[in-house]
Amino acid sequence: MTPTDARRIAEELAEAKGWPFRDPVRIRRKAPWFLGAPRWTVLSNADSKGGNIRVEIDEATGAILASGYNPR
């Protein structure tokens, strides 16, 4: 999985839930703490304190592990 893949998955989730997905977007790959696959964390509207979407994606499967929207 690439950062572009992670962003696409996060954008699709946001669209399905009706959440506004805004730039700039911060994408980070996190190694597992103990066991398991690495995960990608995507944060939209990264320069603001609010209006953010945060999505965590399993690198091996592309499954969404967690997601949330902070409207303000």
Image (spheres, rainbow, N blue to C red):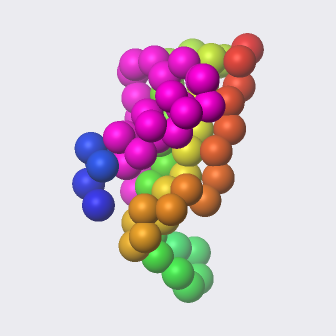
- Asked if residue 31 can be seen in this view, the reply is no
Q: Position of residue 24 (x, y in %)?
A: 39, 21
Q: Position of residue 53 (x, y in %)?
A: 58, 31
Q: Position of residue 47 (x, y in %)?
A: 50, 19
Q: Residue furthest front?
A: 16
Residue 27 falls left or right of residue 58: left
Q: Is the residue 19 above or below the residue 1 in the image? A: above
Residue 66 falls left or right of residue 41: right
- Asked if residue 51 can be seen in this view, the reply is yes
Q: Is residue 14 magenta?
A: yes
Q: Is residue 72 magenta?
A: no
Q: How many marks on residues?
A: 0
Q: Residue furthest bottom?
A: 35
Q: Locate residue 8: give its quadrant.
A: top left
Q: Position of residue 63 (x, y in %)?
A: 50, 62
Q: Is the residue 23 above or below the residue 5 in the image? A: above
Compare residues 61 and 2 and report the one nearer the observer: 61
Quarter of the image where the N terminus is located: bottom left
Tell me which segment is drawn in magenta.
6-29
Compare residues 69 and 16 and report the one nearer the observer: 16
Q: Is the residue 2 above or below the residue 15 in the image? A: below
- Residue located 58% across and 38% down the image: 54
Q: Is the residue 45 above or below the residue 13 in the image? A: above
- Residue located 49% across and 49% down the image: 41
Q: Locate residue 72: give its quadrant.
A: top right
- Residue located 57% across and 75% down the image: 33
Residue 35 falls left or right of residue 1: right
